[in-house]
Image: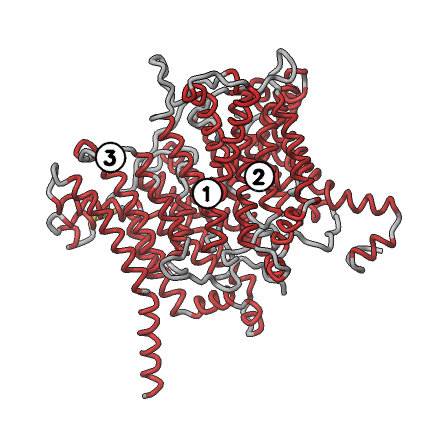
Amino acid sequence: MTQSEKPSLESRSGSTLIQQVWQAATRTVLVPVLAVFTSLIINAIIIKISGGDPILAYLGLWEGAFGSPKAISETLVWSTPYIYAGLAVALAFKGGLFNIGAEGQLSLGALVSAWIGFALPKLLGTPLPWIVHLPLALLGGILAGAIWGAIPGWLKARTGGHEVINTIMMNYIAVLLTSFLLNGVLKDPNPFNVTARTPAIAESARIAPLIDGFRVHWGTILALVVAFAVWWFLWKTTLGFEIRTVGANPDAAKYAGINVSRIIVLTMSLAGGLAGMAGAIEVTALNYRQELGFSTGYGFDAIAIALLGRSHPFGVVLAAILFGAMRNGATRMQFLTQIPVDIISVVQALILLLVAAEEIVRFIYRIKAPKETVVLTRGWGG
Amino acid sequence: MAAQTSTSGNRLRSILRVADLGRFGMIILLIIVLMGVVAMVGAKENRVEVILASFLATLFSVATPLTLGALSGIYCERAGVVNIAIEGLMLGAAFFGFLASIYLKQAGVSDQASLWLGVAAAILTGALFALLHAVLSITFKVDQIISGTVINILAIGITGYLNRQLFFQGNVPHAPGVLPVIHIPFLADLPVFGKIFQQQPIAITAVLLVAITHFVLFYTPWGLHTRAVGEHPKAADTVGINVYFVRYANVLIGGMIAGLGGAYFTLESVPSFEPLMTNGRGFISLAAMIFGNWSPFGAWAATLLFGAAQAMQINLQYYSTSIPEGFDFLKKSQIVGMIPYILTMFALTGIVGRTTPPVADGQAYEK
């Protein structure tokens, strides 16, 4: 009883439990895992051709990522913004929107969060308790990201301007705006400071480390909570159902009485808010300030993570840990083998390629395709 | 007789539609405004006609990659394939074209020959990246926007990795310079405004390609087939047009044109490569294509507007000491630098007349 012969519902009811589990596994996990595996092999060939030792490189990668408690802590530190940003892209995918703007949303979230972190006590003329200050700093970052995401969402709902180009444009505008502010009004006034960065945020706006002596912080735990919340929101609430309906079929959603424009703006705001939170957490838990050029590539990595995680919050968490491990381990790999850390970008692109074009993976490993296909994006018209 | 008048009527209508007067008027108005700002600021230091001539010369030069990117998009999308990978195609082509030129120079080839072969390598790179997009989106029917994004990320990764691996360790070979300026006969000898007609070869080719693309799309059987495949692939298939072949060919043509656009960055503009140097030009050219309603002349006009925004930024930096009190924001390169991106978003709103993409744009064809 193969899927190609009968509709998936029938084959599911007719098969044994083991078959069901196997089918579910092949549908969700097998292809991404094989995609990662295949791209590591292709990458080994690239390393070999460009004159490196792939085995030593991968050993270094593993050692750097998981070789010691400190390495594991650093891997989680890397993974944390990836979880938030990956969720930002995944949530938008669920609503049928392609959010390439996580980068800009993240950097503005970080900027506003840092501003609240250092300027608010001075503005009010009084130190704030952390229970007030920290949530305000986080909320400010989330709000900034949400606004940055809402603009392309509104343009899409109102004028049909495609969110792919608009979110990319918002990224460039965010970079210029950040540079303008960090070189101007938000620049650290300390006379010894020559870099474009804000002053350090107050102690009351900082997130504590999880364990003394390690950099991994409570923001990581919060990321897991947020991932669960996103799952609960998308699958257990009416609003989440409406978002998924608009994503699956906007015409049907409209006939069902869902206000599609409102859902589009809402989805992009929530996505932007998640990306803004990534920035806010980086500032409050790790860097304690915003610096020029601190976020380069989170946005594109987040797309890869969302696709690898199949736009499912739990998949996103796993993919984010994988990407965090690679980014973290790459430094050790470079130290051992002199292979530039940039090779990780190639691995990620290959993974993305194979996940996006899963037909290739299915072709290589002879896996049958499932019946249902997931529509991720649409052309310029919609 | 009747038939003849009807065809000439059609032609007139098609010219009018291409002209799309409202849109063109708007674009010309905006270019004049941008030019006016520069002329007013620079008037203290230079004669107005000199400022305008140098502004227009810069405009045509910086609009080149945008024009080529938009034409690349038109070939792909007229055949029904959304190509959001133009940014990555240009970045990859800029890198590999540059790479080819410096290694050829190192191998003893003359500067001129290495540059031209570098351009050829860039075009080939564009074609190879485009082939990947074609395989993914036409054969494997991957979502075209996902496939394009994958190629963009791949291009960033590969160029970043190789750039560091090859150029940051030890000796960087010398680049053979940039392509020579060509003086267009007669026009380049005009007083003051002759400067506009002293352009480099890729800039000139881009303008020629606008006219050629218009001719190919609207006056040749190939263009008819391309548009048929982009509008109604099933109908095209029924009358014997090979949908897959036409799509593959147009995506490859588009890739080669984008590759030429990539060559502009490292072989015509500056003799060096920097990671991420395309800086969103591929995406801006897509917006120009949409703003120009998928027509070559319309898209060209839109790219000139973006070029004008960039030319203004360059000129204002040059005249920054003459910027009057109260207009200090014009001194901030970050603020003026936002203009092309904001214009892009503005163009996409469709405020200036709605645009209509080819009907089957973005849809994989199932036989």
Q: Chain of mark 1?
A: A
User: For the residue marked with disc 2, what is the amino acid?
Assistant: Ala
**Tag 1 residue:** A168
Q: Which mark is residue A88?
A: 2
- Same-chain status of marks 3 and 2: no
Q: Is residue B122 visible?
A: yes
User: For the residue marked with disc 1, what is the amino acid?
Assistant: Ile
Disc 3 from disc 2: Cα separation: 37 Å
Residue B254 lies in what quarter of the image?
Answer: bottom left
Q: Residues within 10 Å of mark 1 (few under 14, many from 20)?
A: many
Disc 2 from disc 1: Cα separation: 15 Å
**Tag 3 residue:** B317
- Same-chain status of marks 1 and 3: no
Q: Secondary structure at mark 2?
A: helix
User: For the residue marked with disc 3, what is the amino acid?
Assistant: Gln
Image quadrant holding the N terminus of chain B, namely: bottom left
